[in-house]
Image (spheres, rainbow, N blue to C red):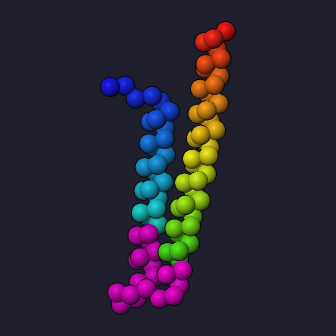
């Protein structure tokens, strides 16, 4: 089973982004927990973290799609010449 380089890059980028999200949620949980509950600021930080994660994944997806599509098109053009 061979895995293309592009697929490996996508997998690594996704794993890194998810690991950052988990680390961020853990940090927020430690910083904003007071007697086992979140206050308003903790809840707001969770919402911000989720929004940042969604935006980050969108940017990663866009960049990877543009980069991989461009490289594949260049490689295809080089092989057909």
- Residue pictured at 42% horizontal, 56% vertical: 19
The answer to which quarter of the image holds residue 31 is: bottom left
2 on left or right of 49? left
What secondary structure characterizes most of the magenta part? Answer: helix
Image position, residue 5 (x, y; %): 47, 30
Q: Is residue 26 above or below residue 60?
A: below
- Residue pictured at 63% horizontal, 11% vertical: 80
Q: Is residue 1 above or below residue 58?
A: above
Q: Is residue 16 above or below residue 22?
A: above
Q: Is residue 37 above or below residue 14?
A: below
1 on left or right of 42? left
65 on left or right of 25? right
- Residue span colored magenta: 25-44
The answer to which quarter of the image holds residue 54 is: bottom right
- Residue pictured at 46% horizontal, 49% vertical: 14
Residue lying at the far top of the rendered structure: 81
Image position, residue 40 (x, y; %): 51, 88
Residue lying at the far left of the rendered structure: 1
Task: Quarter of the image for the C terminus: give it.
Answer: top right
The answer to which quarter of the image holds residue 8 is: top left
Task: Quarter of the image for the N terminus: give it.
Answer: top left
Residue lying at the far front of the rendered structure: 80
Is 27 part of what is drawn in magenta? yes
- Residue pictured at 47% horizontal, 66% vertical: 24
62 on left or right of 3? right
Image position, residue 4 (x, y; %): 45, 28
Residue nearer the viewer, 42 or 58:
58
């Amino acid at each position: 089973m061979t895995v293309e380089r592009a697929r490996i890059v996508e997998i690594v980028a996704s794993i890194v982004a998810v690991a950052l999200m988990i680390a961020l949620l853990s940090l927020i949980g430690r910083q904003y927990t007071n007697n086992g509950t979140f206050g308003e600021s903790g809840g707001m930080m969770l919402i911000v973290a989720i929004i940042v994660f969604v935006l980050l994944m969108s940017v990663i997806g866009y960049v990877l799609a543009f980069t991989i599509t461009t490289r594949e098109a260049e490689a295809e053009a080089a092989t057909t010449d």
